[in-house]
Amino acid sequence: MCFPFLLVLAVSKPFVASCNPLNPWPDFSMHVIVIPGPGQHFFYPLNDRPRVVTVFAGKLKVKFEEEDEFQIGAMGLFRVEKGKSCLVTNMLYRDVPIQIVHVGGGRN
C-alpha cells in the first residue's frame, strides 16, 4: 500500500535538543523542550490550535486552571485544548524532556 502524502522524516538528537520547532507539514509542528529538575514550564493559551504533549522520561505534575492536578510519567501523553493554559512541574532532580505537537493552524 502506498501513502504518497507521507514524508520520511529523520532528525538528529542535537537538532531535537536545540528546542527549535520542526514544521514538516503546514498544519503540524513539533518541538522538544527539557524541563530542568526541579523546575516548571507554563503553557500559555493558544486560541488557534490544540497541543499534544508527550513525556519522554521522568514524571511531571500537570495543573490546568480550575481542574485537579494529576501526575504523568514516562511515555504519558496529555492534550492542552485551544484557549487553555496549564502548568507542568518537574519535582525530580533530573531533567524531563517533553515533546510538544501543535496540530492545526501551523506554528507562528
Image (cartoon, rainbow, N blue to C red):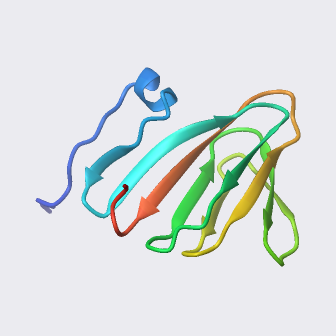
Residue visible at 65% across and 57% down in the picture: 43
Q: Is residue 54 toward the left or the right of residue 64 in the image?
A: left
- 26 over 33 or under it: above or below: below
Residue visible at 36% across and 69% down in the picture: 104
Residue 58: quarter of image: top right
Q: Is residue 93 toward the left or the right of residue 51 in the image?
A: right
Q: Is residue 25 toward the left or the right of residue 64 in the image?
A: left
Residue visible at 62% across and 60% down in the picture: 44
- 105 over 39 or under it: above or below: below
x, y percent for residue 63: 81, 64
Residue visible at 60% across and 67% down in the picture: 45
- 25 over 33 or under it: above or below: below
Choose between 94 and 76: the one closer to the eye. 94
| Quadrant placement of the N terminus | bottom left
Q: Is residue 40 toward the left or the right of residue 44 in the image?
A: right
x, y percent for residue 30: 43, 49
Choose between 16 and 66: the one closer to the eye. 66
